Structure formats: C-alpha cells, structure tokens
Image (tube, rainbow, N blue to C red):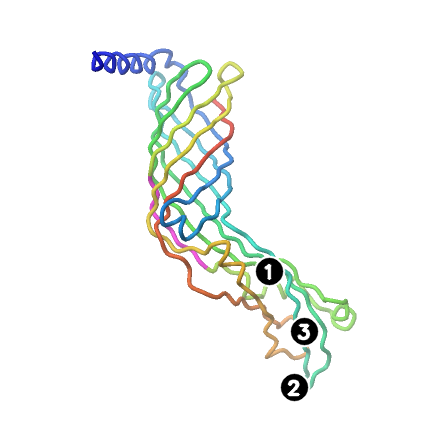
Amino acid sequence: MRKSIFTLCLLGLFALCTTNTSQAQIHFGFDVSGGFPLNEFQAQNPNTGVGINLNAFFPFAPQVPVYIGLDLGFMGNGSRTNTITENLILRDGLGNTIVNFPILFDVQTRNNIFNGHVILRTKIPLPLVQPYFEGLVGFKSFSTRVSLTDVRAGDGIGNNIFNINYDQLRQNSQVNTTVLSSTALSYGFGAGFHIMFGGGQFGLNLGARYLLGGTAQYYTREDINEWTATFDTSSLTTNPDNAQAQLNNGGNPRNSRTDMLVANIGIVIKL
C-alpha cells in the first residue's frame, strides 16, 4: 500500500512538472546572501559573511522545466579601517632634521569571497509558488586586500611648509596590495521557491544552498584586527612624497576546507 502511494506521488509530481510548461522562460535574479561557515571552516572562521549574487537561467527547451544557469557572487568576510599617526621627519642631504610633524593615514583591510557556479535547476511550474531544486559546481576565491585610503598632515604644518602631494604618496605606498589570494573547488545542492507576482513575470526568491568547499587559505576578521601599518622615512630627505607606508601583518593565514551554508533572498525576473 505504501509503495503504491509513493508511486502515485511520483507520478503526480512528474505530471505536474510536465504540464503548463510553456511558461519555461529565461529568468534573471538578484539576491542578498548570507554565508554561514560549517565544519572545520566554522572552527577557524566563525563569522557570517554578507554579500550579493547575480544569476541567469536558461531553459533546455520551452516545454521542459529544467534550467542551466550561471551564478556569480561577492561576499565580505570582515573589514577594518583604522587611522594611524606617525611623525614624518624631513632631513637634508647631511642627515640633519629640517622639521618633524605628525601625519595621519587611514588603512583599510578587507576580506572578500568571490564565487561562481554553474547550476542545473529543476522547477515545479505552479502559478504562484514555484519550488525548485538545484545542483551546483564552481569555485570560491578568497582574497585579502589592504589599501591606504587617505593621507593628510595631522595639524596642517606639512601643508604650510611643503607642497606635499598626498595622492601621489598614497599611490606609491606599499600598503595598496592584495596580501592573499586563494581559490578552492565549490560544489553542492540547494532548494528554494519563487513567489510570483504580476502574472508570473517577476517575484520573490527564497533559497538555501549547502556548498562543500575544497581547501583554501584565508584570513579571518580577528586576524586583520591585529594588523598595523607604519611609514618608512629612513631614506627620506626633503621630498616627503618618497615616504612609504608599509604593512605589518602578523601570523600565517588559516588553512582548511571551506564548507558553507548560504541563504539567499532576492528578486527574480522572467523574460
């Protein structure tokens, strides 16, 4: 009896998916996503990431509710901006100090996760609520970038005495660099549903994905909170633009698998 009921349910689901399939259309989506680390990735990095995803799905045929899609996402995994004060000492060619004045510089550090997946999705084409199931394969790319966002005289003395080009000083800085970049395989499955409005042309997407991830290197939010930066003025003479900001990052990057649970909420538009 139970086997018969299960068989009837499968037949009903198959019939449901193969009826009213003339509505199988190209659709695009924009989602806000939250990434929750799992397993050993969670042990190393307990922080939740927040980002956005863009995707596009194309039906295999007008009467088949199966889609092939491409999804690209960007997620922040911790950032820090701090203002550091250093004394800029200008010397002449003989090494004599000409003037000593404070200089302020803002250093921004960001951990980012960029991901891309090819998706195979099947959807039940109901009029209002359309459940879907999907399989994904792609990559996750982890990066940490440090940028010198602003440089200025602490009390204006430098501007009064010297014609300091702070933009040039910032561009020449060694701090403007990608400290780490690491890529890992990403694959998994997901499920969700579309709530359609406007005659089925647009709607709300709610979904979740379980993404297994290969081993990658990365820094956490706690790691970058311990980083500092300083100005190197050891070779500085009368040209303050020769000063170099240098990053002092301590510790090695983390290394683990990168399993994640990703929750998505956004909009879907059919063409």
Above or below: residue 200 compared with residue 56: above
Q: Which mark is residue 107?
A: 1
The residue labelled by disc 2 is 95
Q: Residue at x 48, y 55 (%)?
A: 144
The Cα atoms of the two marked residues, 1 and 3, are separated by: 16 Å
Quadrant in the rendering for residue 133: top left
The Cα atoms of the two marked residues, 2 and 1, are separated by: 29 Å
The Cα atoms of the two marked residues, 2 and 3, are separated by: 16 Å
Magenta stretch: residue 262 in it? Answer: no
Task: Report helix, strand or loop for mark 1.
Answer: strand
Task: Report helix, strand or loop for mark 3.
Answer: strand
Q: Which mark is residue 87?
A: 3
- Give the magenta-colored segment's residue range: 180-187
Q: Which three-letter amino acid code belongs to the residue tagged 2?
A: Gly
Q: Which three-letter amino acid code belongs to the residue tagged 1?
A: Val
Does the CB distance between marks 1 and 3 fall below 8 Å? no
Q: Where is residue 245 drawn, in percent x and y?
A: 58, 68
**Disc on the earlier residue, 1 or 3:** 3
| Image quarter (top left, top right, bottom left or bottom right) of the N terminus | top left
